[in-house]
Amino acid sequence: MSSIKIECVLLENCRCGESPVWEEASNSLLFVDIPAKKVCRWDSLSKQVQRVTTDASVSSVVLRQSGGYVTTIGTKFCALNWEDQSTTVLATVDKDKKNNRFNDGKVDPAGRYFAGTMAEETAPAILERHQGSLYSLFPDHHVEKYFDQVDISNGLDWSLDHKIFYYIDSLSYSVDAFDYELQTGKICNRRSVYRLEKEEQIPDGMCIDADGKLWVACYNGGRVIRLDPETGKRLQTVKLPVDKTTSCCFGGKDYSEMYVTCARDGMDPEGLIRQPKAGGIFKITGLGVKGIPPYPYAG
Ligand SMILES: O=C(O)[C@H](O)[C@@H](O)[C@H](O)[C@H](O)CO
Ligand SMILES: [Zn+2]
């Protein structure tokens, strides 16, 4: 017996909604619309949305321990002051790659901001391959590079014991794991823990739940899937009424709700008529599993 409920809580018409993150202090969901260059904050109590426009594609947003947020804009890590809507550059990557931009990003349990890059797409998932890299912004604002040759740097999260880093390069159609050293932020020993099935399409954003299982949003697959990274088995599939599901996070009371972002870009007019809520923010309740609070950037 399942009491899973899926509702669209906000019709935002995102061209490419991404990077949902729950901010407990304000009972809000933050997310971005990458090509629309918007960072949004939806207040779950008042149902109001505030938006900040950036000067280039904004691909992820994270909480900041010292207040405000940090975002990845173009190829820059930028502090974002919500009050006056100003941004300050903290670091720049891929300076020799003019066609690159950041994509998904998330903070590790030690407060480092991990984010990867990709070449700009000409259409969803169509781009010059192997142009991306994975980086992290340390609390002292220096940047370390982990590897290059990435196609579409996407979902990431850490195991509950902080010993494994999970990572998705979308066009590998695989969810990968690395050994992770919290002290140094170093990663090694890459391996695949799950390969997507054909109908699951393209793995995109990802988050871990309080049982240590992974939730992956499947772009073009219209679903989120729950994976056991230890056995490599899929445990659950939750389908959504939109195809271009991009990312997911837990939020709400005790992190018992899941929020899912999705995209409108790449849909044809008929698709948009069939799926008028494409680009909205979806809430899934009744999953019977909770998430964990997001880590804030420590710098
Ligand atoms: O949301 C993202 O991560 C990318 O920026 C998007 O463009 C799509 O998800 C991608 O095209 C599908 O792989
Ligand atoms: Zn993504």
Image: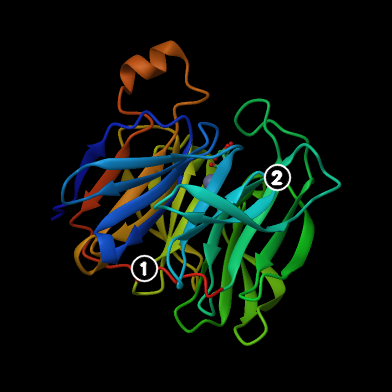
Provide residue 115's location: percent of width, then percent of height.
62, 58
Which residue is drawn at the image coordinates 82% and 43% (left, top)? 97
Is residue 137 visible in the rendered structure shown here? yes
Indicate the quadrant containing the C terminus: top left, top right, bottom left or bottom right.
Answer: bottom right
Question: What residue does disc 2 label?
Answer: 118
Q: Nearer the viewer, residue 297 or 227?
A: 297
Residue type for callout 1: Asp
Left or right: residue 296 versus residue 123 is left
Does the numbered disc 2 mark a residue whose Cβ is under 8 Å from ligand 1?
yes
* Numbered circle sitting on residue 209: 1
Residue type for callout 2: Met
The residue most toward the bottom is 183
Which residue is drawn at the image coordinates 32% and 18% (left, top)? 274
Provide residue 41's location: percent of width, then percent of height.
34, 48
Q: Which of marks 2 and 1 is in front?
A: 2
Write down the quadrant of residue 134 in the picture.
bottom right
Which residue is drawn at the image coordinates 38% and 51% (left, top)? 30
The residue most toward the top is 269
Ligand 1 picture quarter: top right
Provide residue 171's location: percent of width, then percent of height.
66, 44
Q: Which of 169 and 199 is in front in this view?
A: 169
Write down the quadrant of residue 261 in the picture.
top left
Q: Contact (CB < 8 A) between labels 2 and 1?
A: no
Left or right: residue 52 versus residue 237 is right
Whether residue 32 is situated above or below residue 181 in the rendered picture: above
* Label 1 element class: loop
Write down the quadrant of residue 77 in the picture.
bottom right
